[in-house]
Amino acid sequence: MKEKMTEQSIKLFEKKGFSETSIQDIVEANGVTKGTFYYYFSSKEELLMDIHLRYIDDLLLNQEKIVNDDSKSCKTKLYDIIYMLISNIKTQGASAKVFFREMRNLNEEHLSEIIPKRDQFRLTIEGLLLEGIEKEEFRKDLNAPIATFGVLGMANWSYQWYNPEGAASEEEVARTFTDMILKGIDQ
Amino acid sequence: MKEKMTEQSIKLFEKKGFSETSIQDIVEANGVTKGTFYYYFSSKEELLMDIHLRYIDDLLLNQEKIVNDDSKSCKTKLYDIIYMLISNIKTQGASAKVFFREMRNLNEEHLSEIIPKRDQFRLTIEGLLLEGIEKEEFRKDLNAPIATFGVLGMANWSYQWYNPEGAASEEEVARTFTDMILKGIDQ
Amino acid sequence: MKEKMTEQSIKLFEKKGFSETSIQDIVEANGVTKGTFYYYFSSKEELLMDIHLRYIDDLLLNQEKIVNDDSKSCKTKLYDIIYMLISNIKTQGASAKVFFREMRNLNEEHLSEIIPKRDQFRLTIEGLLLEGIEKEEFRKDLNAPIATFGVLGMANWSYQWYNPEGAASEEEVARTFTDMILKGIDQ
Amino acid sequence: MKEKMTEQSIKLFEKKGFSETSIQDIVEANGVTKGTFYYYFSSKEELLMDIHLRYIDDLLLNQEKIVNDDSKSCKTKLYDIIYMLISNIKTQGASAKVFFREMRNLNEEHLSEIIPKRDQFRLTIEGLLLEGIEKEEFRKDLNAPIATFGVLGMANWSYQWYNPEGAASEEEVARTFTDMILKGIDQ
DNA sequence: TATGAATGAGCATTCATTCAT
DNA sequence: AATGAATGAATGCTCATTCAT
């Protein structure tokens, strides 16, 4: 039931937004009553935190698997991370949107748990770029921190427009983005 | 007064979010009473629409100036647009955040006015990429629509992290992004 | 202007009700601004009182003309009063509806001016019935006070259903009612 | 509680009017808080509809009982209906006043449910008159529709003046009215 | 595990009214 | 004679939360 309620809530939060979704909406979507909600969650905010944790922990796990694979080059790892983020949209798109849009609604205490994890994800990419520079896979003059934000921006922004049902496949998008990042668009 | 209230509202919406900001918050920030708000705005949503229109119209105007300058190459125009978006953060950052985050709170009618404008901005960039391909400034095999989303993602995501008061200048960010896009990060 | 505003207000009060009509509605219907309203009326309630006074004074005047005509029998006077009330609907229907429905919205002081006038109208009819009994035009055993309420009920209720544009003429309605009252419906 | 709140609301609506009675007034009269009101009613208008339905359904039920009694003449049935309406004031007076005065505050949809019922009540009386004419209990030349409005006017208007605590009994009023209608006041 | 009744604070909005100009 | 800016109290309604059962 808790699981089911969380899933439904993610859908509702994605569609209507966290503040715009009432406990009433959530329990109606689950065919239960308000009391049931408070049996499983101590507050609406706690549910939001659950969703955040679940999303970022899963993301960090996947990222870790990629970067820890010593058989791959930095370039490949970069592609894999971008591909992971894009293909995530199909399965985790709603969670991702909630994660990026609704973080503001977490309380101080919860924020202080989430923000380091979000930063860790970014800094791992930054570390990958630095490693790539060192291994002469990437340009020496690259501003790694800013480039990292660029990579993240490209990938995360997809949540605003990418439709897994549409014409472009995840591979196509990930490939186009990685190509842009690696080779540039210059003729 | 209307002007002043709009400015204050943008700040509040950026900090707390649209739904989380009450009319009470807005009028207190302006030292007036609720009646005054409704003297100038017919609803909270109308104020949000005002903010959206102002932002996107200004953006389209700036974009138009850039792309209509026939003395510039496509590459330069691309840099100019990226720079414009980044440097916009200093003066228009709050508006931009409100624009990207709160669009969902507009009603159907207002959305149908804003979405075409937002699309127009994107399609103008896509047009610039296509023109660049034709003029052999950009790679022939570039997937222009996806690349456009990449460019926009990089630039728009800055609103989530770029701090104009911080170490990196707008030029630096814009230059790093343009370099990434043009030359790639490949060694 | 004051005249025009009063007329428009009567229409609005009839259609939407006194409480449901805002000063804003009234001034918009007159193409002026709120300030103008308060230049002519000291309050919304005062406007309502104006309408009440105007209506009841006119009614009393007409009634007086009828009962003071010594050439007429009591029966004829009764018919005349009923006809006057019914035909009033065409010209004064809106005022009448406002009068009967919205009296509750007058303040104590104003009520104490209106109620005696309304009672006077009724008591004049009661007096007419009593006079008719004495002159042996009406049944001796008639309960004049209750019968008066009956006559008033019939006539005043017309405001709830009588449509001057409809099939039945005022004469027809007044004639049917007077016949009912005088001869009854008994075979 | 819902029952209790409805009863209290009827009293308040009668005394102050629907629009002039706030939810605050209602909950204070019941010693509960606003939330409780909205737990039982989805809106103030819905409460009004409840009151309307309850009243008119009860009235139609009583009317039906009277007209379906084949042992009675049309005259007796007419008396019974008038008596029912007058004696109703003691038990249902407040509801009746709310019904007649506040119908305008129902929304379109609710009105379309109430109006046919109100018309049904009237048309049943009209049918009774027509039947009486046919059975030669009533005058052949009677204009049944208008006479019906006359009967209803007399009876319904009582809600504006009849005081069950006062000198005249319900029987007296009903008898006077029925006499007027049947025999007229003519000497 | 789950419900249903109740709370109380808060919200967007309306409105009659005031008043300097 | 009329305006336009502003007020402040009130209104209908929503909502996260509590708690006895």
Image: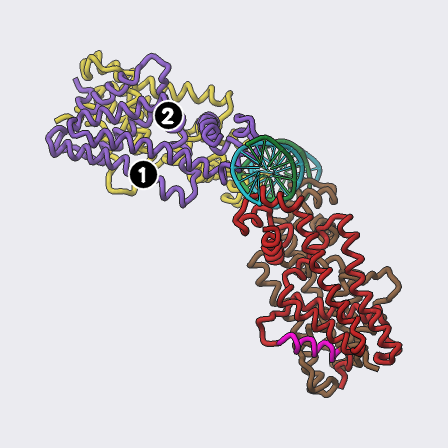
Chain colours: A yellow, B purple, C red, D brown, E green, F cyan
Place of residue B105 in the rendered image (x, y in percent of width and height, measured from the top left): 44, 38
Which residue is identified by label 2?
A: B92
* Residue B17 seen in render: no
Per the image, label 2 sits on a secondary structure element best described as helix
Query: What kind of residue is marked 1?
Result: Lys
Residues in magenta, as a range: C169-180
Is C25 or E1 nearer to us in this picture?
C25
Q: Determine the image quadrant of residue A79.
A: top left
Which residue is identified by label 1?
A: B117
Per the image, label 1 sits on a secondary structure element best described as helix
- Is residue C177 one of those drawn in magenta? yes
Place of residue A153 in the rendered image (x, y in percent of width and height, measured from the top left): 31, 26
Q: Chain of mark 2?
A: B
Name the residue located 38 percent from the left edge and 27 percent from the top edge. A58
Q: In this picture, is A132 found above or below D33? A: above
Q: Determine the image quadrant of residue B57.
A: top left
Crowding at label 2, few (<14), some or many (≥20) Cα neighbours within 10 Å? some
Q: Chain of mark 1?
A: B
